[in-house]
Amino acid sequence: MKIALIGYGKMGHIIEQTAKARGHEIVSIIDIDNPQDFDSPEFASADVAIEFTSPTAAYGNYLRAFKHNVKVVSGSTGWMKDHGDDVRRLCTEGGQTLFWASNFSVGVAIFSAVNRYLAKIMNGFPQYDVRMVETHHVHKLDAPSGTAITLADDIVARLDRKDGWVKGEQHLADGSVSGSNDVPAGKIAIESIRRDEVPGIHTVIYDSDADSITITHDAHSRQGFALGAVLAAEYTKDHSGLLTTSDLFKF
């Protein structure tokens, strides 16, 4: 398969290594210093483009790829609020293809399925309150993480006593702390911690007077995210529309 890379940071380099190890060809690499290559024949020849950039760049990257009818796999977050409706229209009425996920890790896909099932069970046990903690490296600017938001949304959809999430305590890289986990009863507090070079830890905690139930996913490296992105590209090559991990992983 021919793959184009959009974004060539740490994730882009690991995705490149993973894709080549699985026998794929990297035909184009686009980063901040060569956006003109979107209009190159090499980019247009790609079966799928894998995009890991920033919330401000992602939507424009999708449009540039769609201009050449190149399918996109993207792990960029933060764009959906402003551009989600337009992207959905492009992928339903416009004939374009985007596989989007807040997290491509196979382990996170399994963890998300467990999270959904646990929330369904806990809907019948109102004595348990629920909160979340996400921990990432100091270079991560957005909080809470896109994965934490997806996990929280999945809980809200299954827990009648919750109608949304809010930011909880924010532990910044400089050691300062702001915010509070003391939130309205109908909300899920998402606590965010930024420290060291942590790839990503997500924890869901159900707490009652009697006991606590905790589930955690702890990424050891970015390798799992890269493999998931390449698996998504392999799936996307032969599928179309707006795709997600629930299409790729049938749990």
Image (cartoon, rainbow, N blue to C red):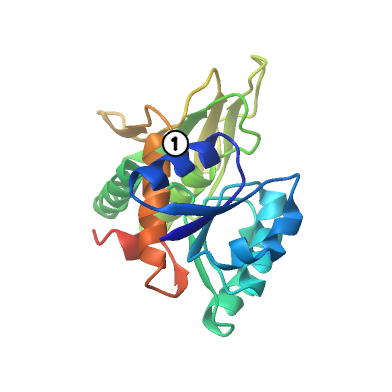
Nearer to us in this view, 93 or 152: 93
Q: Residue furthest top?
A: 175
Q: Residues within 10 Å of mark 1 (few under 14, many from 20)?
A: many
Q: Residue at x 63, y 51 (%)?
A: 78
Q: Residue at x 52, y 32 (%)?
A: 191
Any part of residue 178 in sight:
yes
Is 146 left, or right, of 243 in this rendering?
Answer: right
Residue 219: x, y in percent?
38, 31
Of residues 41 and 76, the one nearer the viewer is: 41
- Where is residue 187 drawn, in percent x and y? 51, 46
Q: Quadrant of the C terminus?
A: bottom left
Residue 206 percent across, percent down from the top left: 33, 37
SS state under label 1: strand
Name the side, left or right, on which 243 lies relative to 114: right
Q: Quadrant of the N terminus?
A: bottom left
Q: Is residue 99 above or below residue 161?
A: below
| Three-letter amino acid code of the residue under disc 1 | Met
Disc 1 designates what residue? 132
Name above or below for residue 242 compared with residue 174: below
